[in-house]
Amino acid sequence: MFYAYILNNGGKGIVDSWDKCEQIVKGQSSAKYKKFKTIEEATEFISNNGVAENIIPVLDKNAIYFDAGTGRGRGVEVRITRSNGTSLLSYIKEKKGIVDLLNKHNWFINEFDNIELGKNYTNNFGELFGCYIALIIANEVNCKTIYGDSDLVIKYWSQGNCKSNDDLTKKLSNTVTKIRNNFDGLINHISGDINPADLGFHK
């Protein structure tokens, strides 16, 4: 894999690992960065000033999309949106159970209308929490389709197969599994390249 980046000051480049890319873009809120399979695609991304492609994908307008990311350098963020990228957190801001959960762990809804978990959590935990919130909202608005780009969460952690040693992760996995088992809909995989909730890079 290749990781292309464009920094706030105009600096740009391509590296061969996420760890290297993360160190370069960390703390730069308007940096753009993206993962590619070929160096040609990464080079084109830089040449186009951060535009990966001109093809506009057709997305399910009735679906809910979730993602997690660490690109702002403030730890894990979770984003839940419609197909146009509009946040759906308004549906849970007043729900007592969710508010209590956020307060208990010092999580909060930040200025970007994402849930900020902080630096003590993994991105995979963020994806699992995103799936949890997406399921809560889907049941609230009677949505039958959810999309995320984490195979680990969609195929395993949300179906009772969590190998993590972290107690909070296992507890959340069990909760998500129970909700998913009663969910009258589907959770599907979507490429991070077209996920409207994508936190892979920030414009």
Image (cartoon, rainbow, N blue to C red):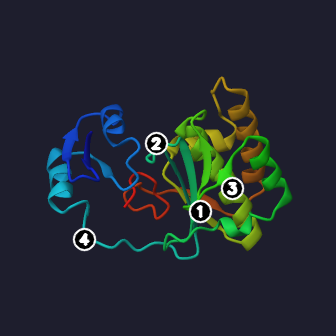
The residue under label 4 is which amino acid type? Asn
The residue under label 2 is which amino acid type? Gly
Tell me: 62 left or right of 133: left
Tell me: 46 left or right of 149: left
Report the residue at 54% width, 71% height from top: 86
Q: Residues within 10 Å of mark 2 (few under 14, many from 20)?
A: some
The residue under label 3 is which amino acid type? Ile
Between residues 78 and 194, which one lies in front from this camera angle? Answer: 78
* Separation of residues labelled 2 and 4 (CA atoms): 29 Å
* Separation of residues labelled 1 and 3 (CA atoms): 13 Å
Q: Which residue is mark 3?
A: 133
SS assignment at label 4: loop
Report the residue at 73% width, 40% height from top: 172
Report the residue at 27% width, 50% height from top: 7
Q: Which comes before the other along the chain, label 1 or label 2? A: 2
User: In the figure, 61 relative to 105: above or below?
Assistant: below
The quarter of the picture where the N terminus appears is top left
Q: Which comes before the other along the chain, label 2 or label 4? A: 4
* Separation of residues labelled 3 and 2 (CA atoms): 22 Å
Q: Which comes before the other along the chain, label 1 or label 3? A: 1
The residue under label 1 is which amino acid type? Asp
Q: Position of residue 22 (x, y in %)?
A: 36, 38
Q: Quadrant of residue 125?
A: top right
Q: Which comes before the other along the chain, label 1 or label 4? A: 4
Q: Position of residue 50 (x, y in %)?
A: 25, 59
Q: Which comes before the other along the chain, label 3 or label 4? A: 4
| Residues at circles 3 and 2 in contact by the CB criterion of under 8 Å | no
Q: Which residue is mark 2?
A: 73
Disc number placed over residue 113 in the picture, else none: 1
Disc number placed over residue 54 in the picture, else none: 4
Between residues 63 and 6, which one lies in front from this camera angle? Answer: 6
